[in-house]
Image: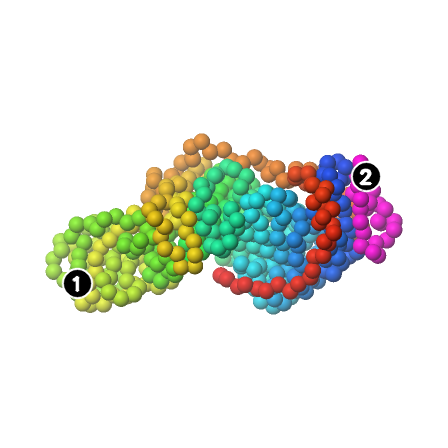
Amino acid sequence: MKRNVRHSPAQAPRVAALISLAATLILTASGLEGATTVNAKSASQSDVAAAIASAADGDTVMIPGGTATWTHTLPIRKAITLQGSGVGVTIIKDSVQKGRLIDWTLAAGYPSRLTGIEFQDGGRPNHALAPGGIIHIDGSNDGSQFRWDHSKWGDMNGVAVADTVIGVFDHLDITINGKMNFFLYIYGNHWNGDTGGNGDKSWTMPANYGSSQFLFIEDCTTTKVRPGGITFLTSAFAGARFVVRYNRLNADDTVNNHGTESRRRSGRAMEIYNNTFAGNDRGRQIGGIRGGGVLIHDNTITGYQGAIAVFSLNCYRELSTSVQTFGGADGTNVWDANYAAPPNNGPFTVSAVSRFTVTVSGSPNWQNNQWRHYTILRDAGRFGFGLITGNTQNQISWAGGFQRNMTINVGDTFHITRVNHALDQPGVGAGSLISGSNPKPPPGWNNQVTEPCYAWNNTSNGAAINLFAPDNQYSIRENEHYFNSAMPSYTPYVYPHPLTKGLLPEQMTQNAKANSQHNLRKQRRPWGGKKLDKKKQNKTKESPTNVMADGQENVDN
């Protein structure tokens, strides 16, 4: 079967011929119809962009060895493999002054891949924060797939961003915490064609643990530039779904998501298993969620304060009096499922105040801690509730808040309320579709269902450990919203991820580093996917442009 190899104009003839032969053999072995290798003249941004412009869906764009500093955004809108000559051989330095280094929108129904490149900071002046980031990949659950593999992330001045990406990041060497304590931000904004930018459609769907419909981070290694402190392997928002498995996490890493603490929804679901976490005892958390669900099992933990290592479960809306859009979970909020008002719940008048404690006038004669896990709700004014941590016969104490604490004065009155489960809290999911920038509860709300979190078979410093801790929040209840036991009828997705098949042997990859930048043994076999429609391929080749553009940074913490 004949295979074509195209070259950028100035490729040396002998090297071109050798690359053509090797690419022909590799593509023939892969069985990918119509696939072509396009060789960039050099690692410079303009040469890589020119090669991409002449590529079509299914092609591989080869970047030779060398070090190049890129100063503008490279947009990619094709289902291609962008392949360097290996870590330490092809080195791209990020010197973009504003915007993204690579901005990749995946093609529906096709696989894409980024491989064999070492990324280094090249003088970016300001942090490239999410949702923009340095490398930004936009996908959907539309049949597009993405693989980023055998590359190095070398203490970059910003983060990577994956928005609704189905696929795998594998064999990445991640250096962190010199310039940024974060590596990867994950979103689910585009689930089922969602255009709202808040992850609403992802939240209507079940978690589907054990399925392929996640972004998998596997067989990666992290290291730290400087000692001390914790790092964040992940942060997640807007219905994100991801799996962290079989990694060696040596940088005091934590795996986290954000909650529904603004209009944007929480991360939706994550699985964390068969990882090695190595900490320095500066922190006890190996991670935590503030919404959605998690399965965490078969992890080996050292450090992280040993017996008190924890994966935390929190609902910040129960602790915050200043949450945008949905408001705080104060026991009366229509976005939450609330208990009916308890008997004799107020009003009570404040006679004395100290930090996070009030004394009430009269003699209510409460039983000790009868109001623990309820909410103290001030009757007038803003910023007026707190999660009760305990009480005496006439005093109530509450937890300090996230963002803003309740303020209450002598003479104020309050009632006592109670949340059953809060919008998007850990251990719940699904529910009716919410939409719009200022949404109203859909009919029948809150109809979210219980989807428990599970933790099992984890060890800390060699001893079995129950990792979950709900931090005094009654709405997150053991044996209802979380279990320190195995999830029934759960089977992890196949490992290694199917997209990792067809690699050259690792030893060949290592040997290639010692050879010239054009050493053909460094080429990797294109990875599987559906056969390309030749009519579609030809049509794509008629519109080859992939225009260079400056990205616009959209900074968001």
Quadrant location of residue 49? bottom right
Chosen colour scheme: rainbow
The residue positioned 69% from the left and 41% from the top of the image is 532
Percent x, y of residue 298: 49, 38
Question: Quick check: 281 left or right of 93?
Answer: left
The numbered mark at residue 405 is: none
The residue positioned 17% from the left and 59% from the top of the image is 347
Percent x, y of residue 150: 66, 47
The residue positioned 59% from the left and 53% from the top of the image is 137
Percent x, y of residue 192: 51, 46
Q: Amino acid at mark 2?
A: Lys
Q: Which residues are magenta?
A: 1-25
Above or below residue 522? Residue 225 is: below
Instruction: From the viewer's side, name the closer residue of 128 and 172.
Output: 128
Crowding at dot 1, Cα within 10 Å, few <14 / some 14-19 / many 20+, comes out as some
Which element type, helix, strand or loop, lies under badge 1? strand
List the residue tagged with mark 2: 2
Mark 2 and mark 1 lie on one chain; the one further toward the N terminus is 2
The residue positioned 83% from the left and 56% from the top of the image is 9
Q: CA distance from mark 2 to mark 1?
A: 86 Å
